[in-house]
Image (cartoon, helix red, strand yellow):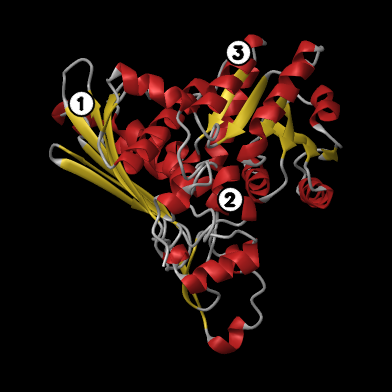
Amino acid sequence: MQPLKLGIIGAGFIGTFHARALMQVRNMEIAGITSRTKSRAQALSKMVKKNGLGDGVVYSNITEMVNHVDVIAIYAPNFVRVEMVEEIVDAVKNGANLKGVICEKPLARNMKEARRIVEAVKGVGLKTAYFENQIFMKPIQTQLQQLAPQQKTMGPLMLTRSAEEHGGPHEPWFWDPTKQGGGVLSDMGCHSIAVGWYLLNPIGKPETFMQPISVSADCALLKWGLPEWREKLLKERGVDYTKTPAEDFTTGVITYKNPETGQIAKAQFTNSWMFEKQGLRLFMDGMGPGYAFEINTLNSSLEIFIGDAAAEVVADAETALEKSTASRGLLAVQYNEPDLYGYTDENEDAAKAFLAGKDASLSWDYGLEITRLVMAAYMSSERQKTIDLTDTRIQEELETFVPLIQQGKGADILYTN
């Protein structure tokens, strides 16, 4: 069977990270690349060809590329997702023979945008994959296998806690809440909410089996609201947090109900752009009746030490760890980050599904539900109250809700020094 020809939209950090993941995937090759920044597309194309990942042809736009690929992957910024999906759909209506479309998290900035693109791709029969890599992490999947007997005997997990934290995003648009959709809750809370929900589902049940019934969350601007850090952000990223701030910390609890037994379970999430350790840390743990698990990606089997004298020759601290904040001292090294974080397996899952003419394990319908929970968390923080997801009025409100932070009105609710 011929490998799927993948067309990538977006040649920034995440597009390059997925290209690294595809070095470990046999049934998909990168046939095309398009980006708003031509130099980035050319750099990614060079990397693709060097590593034998495909032809990596650079196309000037989506419409030009779509007739030369089987699958489109959207790795472009959140604020251009809707128009890109509509361009893809128009191409399919005009005869493009696509097998599927991938969207990196988050699916959209709010429910209105998410529902619009979900309905658009369904209208032309496109199969979909929502890329939420943390669910595919091998530590996550392995603990499920190891604890399957305990789950079946004692019952499923009752409490999960999930955190993703680092020092801040790579690109200026990530910091701009009107473009990104918010701050760290929109950027990384979607990860933690998704993996927490996934882990609470009893083994063998679908990823949306446990029913979310309430959300209680809080958002705050801490480190990046301080004057010296605001000035650094303005100088280096061109984003002014005195005018349009976003949250750099969020935490919350989502309560779920087992529809068969009535059992209540809870998932806690915590995310920040102010993590002052080695670099990106993913932390997850879970508690069941008489058993538990814990995952911390800063616990590596490889550590290196770089002294002051040797640090001057280090060109890129991120060769050790994503979003590394240091180039000297004792460093944790993850030698296969795309695989550790689940990028390899989610690409493999999407390829197998599309080749079989099916949606991936996580479809855009699932991404829509994650968007709903993120919006509910923003609503809870704004109103300083627990949001009842079983209330039909709340359900209707969430369909059109746009957080104040996303509107660029974060200064009204976030404290800045």
Separation of disc 1 and disc 3 at Cα? 37 Å
User: Three-letter amino acid code at disc 3?
Assistant: Lys
In this view, 233 is above or below 185: below
Helix, strand or loop at disc 1? helix
Q: Which mark's residue is nearer the viewer, 2 or 3?
A: 2
Looking at the image, is mark 1 or mark 3 earlier in the sequence?
3
Q: Which mark is residue 227?
A: none
Q: Residue at x 70, y 22 (%)?
A: 86
Q: Which mark's residue is nearer the viewer, 2 or 1?
A: 2
Q: Quadrant of residue 56?
A: top right
User: Three-letter amino acid code at disc 2?
Assistant: Phe
User: Which quadrant, please, contains the C terminus?
Assistant: bottom left
Residue 12 at x, y = what percent? 69, 49
Q: Where is mark 2, residue-wise?
A: 174
Residue 187 at x, y = what percent? 50, 45
Q: Where is mark 3, residue-wise?
A: 122
Q: Where is mark 1, residue-wise?
A: 152
Q: Label 2 crowding class (10 Å Cα cut-off): few <14, some 14-19, many 20+?
A: many
Q: Does the rendering let one see residue 356?
A: no
Q: Are marks 2 and 1 in contact (CB under 8 Å)?
A: no
In this view, 337 is above or below 64: below
Front-lying residue, 157 or 367: 367
Looking at the image, is mark 2 or mark 3 earlier in the sequence?
3
User: Three-letter amino acid code at disc 1?
Assistant: Lys
Q: Are marks 1 and 3 in contact (CB under 8 Å)?
A: no
